[in-house]
Image (cartoon, grey):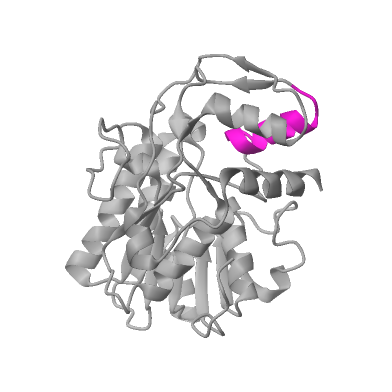
Amino acid sequence: MIKKNRYWKNKRVLVTGYEGFLGSNLTRTLLNCGADIVGIDIVKNRPKSVLNGLRNKIKCIKGDISDFGLVKSVINKHKPRVIFHLAAEAIVGKSNKDPIKTFKSNIEGTWNILEACRDKKFIEAIVSASSDKAYGIHKVLPYKENASLKGSHPYDASKSCADILCYTYWNTYGVPVCVTRCGNLYGAGDFNFSRIVPDAINCSLKGRQFKIRSDGKFTRDYVYVEDAVNGYMLLAEKMKKLKLYGEAFNFSDENPITVIDVVERIYKLTGRKPSYKILNQAQYEIKHQYLCSGKARKILGWKPEYTLDEGMRKTIEWYEK
């Protein structure tokens, strides 16, 4: 976890999507560092969360970031110094079924944040969460931050567009924003069981067979959520001092593995014999995608603190409890 320092003590921070998987873990860490947090989310008091017992320390606002009036009023009233913009439609399958909802949340929601901040001198840093999928499909791997953004499916395209908006608002108006792109996040508090890691853990712990939608040979890199949180906070801290505005940063363990490897590893870590069925039904998904995080390692001094096995063990322990 990130070391406590004076930067976050009593710092007013706005977290959009604070109830989500990454948002709840980030919010918990910020609280531990002494930050004063305002959170916006379309869900309030999610019943199973790493924030249970902590929400009395947060100014919780229920609302949709596609509502510009709400976003503007929250920023004007609370005057956050740092904003972590995480709220989004994050599930690829849902995005394919309802692209308009995804575009409103991921694209319009982002321009609402940026526009509401355009003339606010009190804001020091905005960290906008993107995705490795913003890059689309490239033959050259791993992806570096200077690769073109060419998302070709609804979720991917929404992230490409949002990233370009962030750069535009910095380049044109000087809005102090940076973009983060992570590999597949995993860890405590993820209840989107359409994702591989929580679903495979759930199946393994309950003695069920795991169904692999693809052919099992898709490759990704995986990042433990606490390592991602550490990266987001380091970026916010160093953005002004190092004049990083307008830039993007990848966060990756740089250890791409196949879906089959991930599933087998999870079953073995739970002490069970791997059991899975390959459906080979995946649609609109990139076969091979993983990131280079050399820029974050060199400029921010960031690196993962957890190996894949270490992170998976901590994650499995949390779900067991």
Residue at image location 38% in from the left, 43% down from the top: 132
Q: For the N terminus, give its image quadrant.
A: bottom right
Asked whether residue 70 appears in the rendered view, the answer is no
Vertical relation: 138 (above or below) 307:
above
Q: Position of residue 115 (x, y in %)?
A: 32, 66
Q: Is residue 206 left or right of residue 266?
A: right
Give residue 59's position: percent from left, percent from top: 62, 73
Q: Where is residue 91 shown, x and y percent of the image? A: 51, 38
User: Eyeballing the image, is 209 above or below 93?
Assistant: above
- Name the outermost residue toward the left: 172
Image vertical order of residue 50 relative to residue 244, above or below: above
Q: Nearer the viewer, residue 60 or 193?
A: 193
Front one among 10 and 300:
300
Q: Is residue 226 left or right of residue 52?
A: left
Q: Main secondary structure of the magenta part?
A: helix
**What is the quadrant of residue 254 in the picture?**
top left
Q: From which residue to which does the magenta span run? A: 193-208
Q: Is residue 161 visible?
A: yes
Residue drawn at (50%, 71%) of the image:
14
Asked if the stretch drawn in magenta spans residue 36, the answer is no
